[in-house]
């Protein structure tokens, strides 16, 4: 393999046009994902995780648009790729699975057909071959009796089974990158763990990189080698998962880590309430000047309220966007 | 159960009409055109002449059987043309939106503003009478309801998770419309199509009655009614049987459409439970 990273995002800005003016829904987004790497994007609801993923696969639609920056996939800039060029990437080299396994499958089409369609669409297979491959795909996501299951309609499957089918569809063409946007929030906890495990194993076997998106830092840190924390449209800290837990740098990340129930302190869980970060996430149209976290930050000083901080590279690797970081 | 009765009676009537049309050469007693015999003119219904005979001594029973061919061909084919046009326009308009949607909407409103029979009449006047003209005239003038329905369905379906998922998976627009949208709106489209077939049968009768349909002497139910006009008091069976055939076929199609709606339309299904 070459030394070119699989995904390189540089200074990406995503504009939201609300009719009268443009506001940056996300800005200064930079990150890199190597081949086969697992990378996590964490943050509260509305901080811009999903739109970042959509920008990556060329699916921002008005009122959202790319306002600046560069997205490189496998060394090639893709932010201005033609519609046809983007379709070639989507599903084939970049796949995505969603939050809602209940609605992401076509209700009137057997699941096997929906998997097979990927081989027909992207690999030019005949339907005969594709149907055969669909059975194999279903077997690879550990769906029992795949040769019978291919004929099932989505409503005949449980939520966990549907999510397995979604994974089979996403991985059918052997993509280089799998984007998983809150892939398990709709499932119960045990099924959730199974699905994550399955996804991680399959991607590791095939060398597929994962971009995992979630509001759950614990979950993401568990799966991913590196994690970026987003707050109000900016990445505020990016570190190795272990580091971010051991020594979070940014005050927001510190708050997030402190609010996590820790393994080993389970006994304490019942008695003391978890620490929460005080205050609310600012609305997209009312981002505060300077550091966007300043209204909620205990360490905020005057400069925090006027000029947005740049990123500081940390000695231990990673970066943080804060004047007074740890 | 009422809903099954719709479906069974409607389906049977429609199936009967189709079978009669298909098997006409075997079921008919005489040739519908050639076997004119003035010796038997205007016989009332009897054991020999089940539906009676007309002024030229032709067997009405045989002519009604053959007439089914024209009526059903026109009904089915012209409605298929309408459905294809309506779905193609409505589905793409709802899916793409924008200027194309505006164009299709304007076209649909125009079609809705002009009564379709008048429009068909105008087309027939240009093309001249005959089966092909009938198919064209009726096939081009009755797609607006299908179009509206397809557009509305596409508008709501395009926001469904699986349609967005398909986009993410690299499906092209055409593939999304055909594999994701069309199958999910087919139920109501079929219902409208069935009802439309009924009205096409009626329109065929109307146009043929006006002498714009299939050219005599080949029978269609409408042209038979037209020919029977003058003898309605002296030989009422001439109008009765083709009229009854039209009535039963249209009734059957409407019942069938109703029954299909009960089982295919998710809204009426949820209302039932
Ligand atoms: N289609 C849209 N039109 C207008 N605003 C949008 C649109 N999509 C997203 N936004 C706005 O962009 C911001 C980022 O949204 P995004 O969906 O990326 O959040 P998220 O981090 O994925 O949140 P969640 O955890 O709830 O999924 C939000 O403020 C949202 O209101
Ligand atoms: S820059 Fe200032 S306000 Fe922002 S997180 Fe750091 S200390 Fe807090
Ligand atoms: Mg999201």
Image (tube, coloured by chain):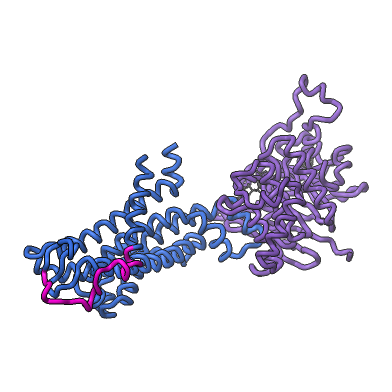
Q: Is residue B187 left or right of residue A95?
A: left
- Work out whether B117 lies above or below B258: below
From the viewer's side, name the closer residue of B74 and A191: B74
Q: Is residue A289 visible?
A: no
- Work out whether B120 lies above or below B178: below
Name the residue: 9% across, 67% down.
B231
From the viewer's side, name the closer residue of B48 and B179: B48
From the viewer's side, name the closer residue of B77 and A313: B77
Name the residue: 85% across, 43% down.
A241
Q: Which quadrant of the figure has residue B131?
A: bottom left
From the image, state the color of chain B. blue
Q: Is residue A204 left or right of residue A18?
A: right
Q: Name the image quarter holding the C terminus of chain A.
A: top right
Q: Which quadrant of the figure has residue A195?
A: top right
From the image, state the color of chain A. purple
- Work out whether A185 lies above or below A202: above
Q: Which quadrant of the figure has residue A184?
A: top right
Q: Name the image quarter holding the N terminus of chain A.
A: bottom right
Residue range in magenta is: B20-42
Looking at the rendered structure, the number of numbered marks drawn on it comes to: 0
**Residue A211 location (% of width, % of height):** 77, 51
Name the residue: 61% across, 47% down.
A154
**Residue A249 location (% of width, % of height):** 85, 41
**Residue A267 location (% of width, % of height):** 82, 21
Q: Is-magenta flag for residue A213?
A: no
Q: Is residue A153 left or right of residue B71?
A: right
- Work out whether A219 lies above or below A173: above
Q: Is residue B148 visible?
A: yes
Q: Seen from this angle, which residue lies furthest left?
A: B234
């Amino acid at each position: 393999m070459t030394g070119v990273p699989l995904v390189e995002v540089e200074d990406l800005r995503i504009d939201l046009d609300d009719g009268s003016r443009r506001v940056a829904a996300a800005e200064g987004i930079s990150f890199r994902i190597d081949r086969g790497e697992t990378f996590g994007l964490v943050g509260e609801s509305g901080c811009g995780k999903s739109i970042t993923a959509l920008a990556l696969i060329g699916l921002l639609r008005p009122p959202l648009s790319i306002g600046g920056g560069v997205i490189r996939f496998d060394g090639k800039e893709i932010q201005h790729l033609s519609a046809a060029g983007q379709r070639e990437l989507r599903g084939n080299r970049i796949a995505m699975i969603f939050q809602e396994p209940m609605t992401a499958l076509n209700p009137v089409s057997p699941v096997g057909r929906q998997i097979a369609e990927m081989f027909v669409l992207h690999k030019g297979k005949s339907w005969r071959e594709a149907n055969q491959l669909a059975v194999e795909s279903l077997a690879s996501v550990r769906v029992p009796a795949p040769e019978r299951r291919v004929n099932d309609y989505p409503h005949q499957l449980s939520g966990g089974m549907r999510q397995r089918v979604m994974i089979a569809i996403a991985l059918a063409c052997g993509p280089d990158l799998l984007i998983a946007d809150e892939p398990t929030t709709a499932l119960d906890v045990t099924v959730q763990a199974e699905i994550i495990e399955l996804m991680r194993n399959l991607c590791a076997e095939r060398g597929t990189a994962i971009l995992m998106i979630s509001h759950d830092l614990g979950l993401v840190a568990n799966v991913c080698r590196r994690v970026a924390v987003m707050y109000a449209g900016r990445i505020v800290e990016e570190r190795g998962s272990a580091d971010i837990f051991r020594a979070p740098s940014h005050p927001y990340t510190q708050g997030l880590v402190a609010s996590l129930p820790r393994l080993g302190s389970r006994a304490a869980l019942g008695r003391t309430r978890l620490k929460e970060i005080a205050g609310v996430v600012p609305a997209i149209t009312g981002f505060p000047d300077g550091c966007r976290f300043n209204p909620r930050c205990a360490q905020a000083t005057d400069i925090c309220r006027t000029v947005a901080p740049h990123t500081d590279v940390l000695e231990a690797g990673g970066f943080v966007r804060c004047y007074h970081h740890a | 159960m009422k809903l099954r009765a719709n479906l069974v009676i409607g389906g049977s009537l429609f199936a009967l009409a189709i079978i009669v049309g298909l098997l006409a050469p075997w079921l008919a007693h005489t040739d519908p055109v050639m076997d004119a015999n003035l010796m038997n003119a205007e016989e009332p219904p009897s054991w020999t002449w089940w539906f009676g005979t007309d002024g030229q001594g032709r067997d009405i029973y045989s002519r009604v059987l053959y007439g089914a061919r024209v009526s059903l061909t026109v009904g089915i084919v012209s409605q298929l043309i309408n459905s294809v046009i309506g779905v193609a326009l409505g589905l793409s308009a709802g899916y793409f939106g924008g200027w194309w949607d505006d164009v299709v909407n304007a076209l649909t409103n125009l079609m809705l503003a002009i009564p379709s029979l008048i429009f068909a009449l105008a087309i027939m006047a240009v093309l001249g009478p005959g089966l092909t003209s009938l198919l064209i005239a009726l096939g081009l003038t009755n797609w607006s309801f299908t179009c509206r329905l397809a557009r509305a369905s596409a508008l709501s379906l395009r926001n469904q998770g699986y349609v967005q998922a398909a986009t993410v998976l690299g499906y092209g627009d055409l593939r999304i419309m055909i594999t994701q949208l069309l199958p999910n709106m087919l139920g109501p489209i079929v219902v409208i199509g069935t009802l439309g077939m009924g009205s096409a049968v009626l329109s065929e009768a109307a146009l043929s009655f006006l002498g714009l349909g299939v050219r005599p002497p080949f029978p269609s139910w409408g042209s038979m009614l037209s020919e029977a006009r003058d003898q309605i008091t002296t030989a009422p069976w001439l109008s009765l049987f083709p009229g009854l055939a039209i009535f039963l076929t249209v009734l059957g199609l409407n019942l069938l459409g109703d029954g299909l709606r009960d089982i295919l339309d998710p809204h009426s299904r949820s209302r039932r439970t």
